[in-house]
Image (cartoon, rainbow, N blue to C red):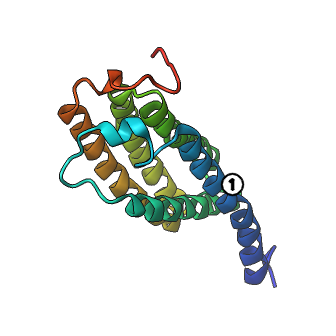
Amino acid sequence: MNQIASRSQLRISYLRWALFTVPLVLLLGIGSGRMAGSGYGNRWFAALEKPELMPASWVFGLVWPLLYLLLGLALALILHARGARFRWWAIGLFLVLLLMVFVWPVLFFAAHQITAALYLIGAIFGFSIITILLLARIRPTAALLMLPFLLWIAFAAYLNYEILRLNPDAESLVAPAVRTQI
């Protein structure tokens, strides 16, 4: 036997990473949404005119935890890819991407900065593409796990744009819970 680790040892190693990354990404993602007061319960958001394709609130409550689960699994795959070329670049890009994703609800729902949130979601989309391309070179499965996230971000960017278009005065409707200067 000329292998350093058996297949079962490698699976256990990945499972350990996943048991760390999945709950962490879920906790941080859901925490950022709660901290921002995101969703239909937000008084400011409820007052906005919504686009026709705006999903019901339960859709967001179902989709985001699933996306966070997939992101956590993709991150575990990359962390598990020891010795892979560009691994540290992929981890760095992934963490920057997660940070941007966690900041978006604060910018949109708490600070009421729809325009800045639109720019941020555009950056999230671009970073997602770059990250997926890099992950595909390291672990193709990790890149595949991120494709639903990329599709949802594209849809969320459309919703962000439409809300901005339909509500040009939205940033001044209700005093923001958080003030930012960007």
Residue at image position (47%, 44%) is: 38
Residue displayed at 42% across by 58% down: 60
Relative side of 18 to 66, left or right: right
Residue plotted at (49% across, 60% down): 67
Q: Position of residue 100 (x, y in %)?
A: 51, 37
| Relative horizontal placement of residue 90, taking residue 43 as reference (left or right) | right
| Total count of labels | 1
Q: Quadrant of the C terminus?
A: top left
In the depicted structure, whether residue 46 falls above or below residue 141: above
44, above or below 68, in the image: above
Q: In this view of the protein, which residue sits in the foreground, 78 or 167?
A: 167
Q: Foreground: 39 or 73?
A: 39
Q: Quadrant of the N terminus?
A: bottom right
User: Which residue does the numbered mark 1 point to in the structure image?
Assistant: 24
Nearest the viewer among 31 and 123 is 31
The location of residue 23, given as percent across then percent down, is 68, 60
Q: Is residue 81 at least partly visible in the picture?
A: no
Neighbourhood count class around disc 1 (C-alpha, 10 Å): few under 14, some 14–19, many 20 upward: some
| Point 35% across, 42% down: residue | 46
| Relative image position of residue 171 (x, y in whole percent) | 34, 24
**Residue with the most extreme top position:** 181
Q: Is residue 107 above or below residue 151?
A: above
- Horizontal side of 60 relative to 24 (left or right) equals left
Q: Can I make out residue 111 in this image?
A: yes
* Secondary element at tag 1: helix
Question: The disc labelled 1 sits on which kind of residue?
Answer: Leu
